[in-house]
Image (cartoon, rainbow, N blue to C red):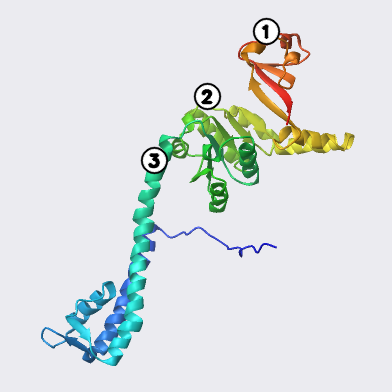
Amino acid sequence: MAILPPATLKRKSTLPVWVSIAWRVLAVLAMLAIAVGVHWIERDGLKDMADGNVSFLDILYFTSISVTTTGYGDIVPVSTSARMFDAFIVTPIRVFVVLLFIGTAYNFVLKRTWDKWRMAVIQKTLRGHIVVAGYGSTGSETVDELIARGTPAGRIVVIDLDEDNLARAKACGCIVLHADATRDQVLNEVRIENADAMIVTAGRDDTSILITLTARHLAPGLPISVTVRNEDNEVPARAAGATTVVNPVSFSGLLLAGSCQGSHLSDYLMDLASYHGQVELTERKVAEHEIGKPLSTITTGIGLRVYRGDAFYDRKSPEARTLQAGDQIVEIIGN
């Protein structure tokens, strides 16, 4: 049985950057002050190789040099207590100060510079990708299904404000961005105008609609699919620019209602919706060799419906007897 690591509670730091830097500086100054105080008390155990007199300025100099380097040898500890203090107190302080400086430089300089450079490199090649706004339960299932259907994880960009969600998306191989997807700048950073599609699963209908509205005015021709929980919000979502609006509550109701008429109907519907099912419901453009033929004669699967412009026609409709260039075919294929 696998042993899982213990769960850790996390909370985003509310401290400004300057406060974080300030407390590190104060920690270094406090340790220097302690070392200066002890060295002053033990000044008789120090020897100045220049004039033999150890002043307070010599103590400041010796302490700062000892903490930041290994010293120059012009002032040296000669007593046992002074040497023990330098060995067991000053040396750990030196290591701690060095690590603190390195950590500060990494967090506030190197890491940010590196992240900006990496982001610029990724943005240059960001084309034909799928943007997923929200990586909760619905968003993660959506990404899993996209990957199962053949979309490379590296072509999926996940935007979320939850660090744990982003960590899970990154583990799948997705490109992640810790940001608010309702903002123009954020969607511009993920090159929304170059994306193939966008999926919005923010968890709140108002947030999802606002994200959709923001994306639509930045990318007028982008296919946008959004989930809403309240049926009343389906119309506002379409008005905001959503190409497809999915209500998971309504879909669950369809499955439950179907299960009352037959125990296998809901299983078949799930098979149709999932890539892992025995049958798959797909949509594609009409092939060149199919133009002029009836929908019922296609050989790739069972043709169910033809979408032509803003209208759609079932397989028995007169319009479905002659496929035209630009038609979209919805069909069932076997896996």
| Mark seen at residue 221 | 2
Three-letter residue code for mark 1? Gly
Judged by depth in the image, the label closer to the viewer, 3 or 1, is 1
Which amino acid lies under the numbered mark 2 shown in the image of this protein?
Gly
Name the residue: 36% across, 72% down: 96
N-term mark: 3 or 1: 3
**Left or right for 153, reference 94:** right
Quadrant of the rendered structure where residue 42 is?
Answer: bottom left
Tag 1 secondary structure: loop
Q: Distance between the residues labelled 3 and 2?
A: 25 Å
Q: In the picture, which quadrant includes the N terminus? A: bottom right
Q: Earlier in the sequence, mark 3 or mark 2?
A: 3
Report whether 216 appears left or right of 265: left
What residue is shown with label 3? Answer: 120
Residue 266 showing in the rendered view: yes
Q: How crowded is mark 1: few (under 14 residues within 10 Å), some or many (20 or more)?
A: few
| Residue 181 x, y percent position in the rendering | 51, 40
The residue under label 1 is 292
User: CB under 8 Å between callouts 3 and 1?
Assistant: no
Quarter of image, res 19: bottom left
Q: Nearer the viewer, mark 3 or mark 2?
A: 3
Distance, label 3 to label 1, CA atoms, is 48 Å
Q: Disc 2 or disc 1, which is closer to the eye? A: 1
Report helix, strand or loop for mark 2: loop
Query: Whole-percent x and y of residue 11?
Result: 53, 60
| Number of residues whose C-alpha sits closer than 10 Å to that of mark 3, classed few (under 14), some (14–19) or many (20 or more) | few
Q: Position of residue 226 (x, y in %)?
A: 62, 34
Up-down: is 122 above or below 78? above
43 or 236, which lies in front? 43
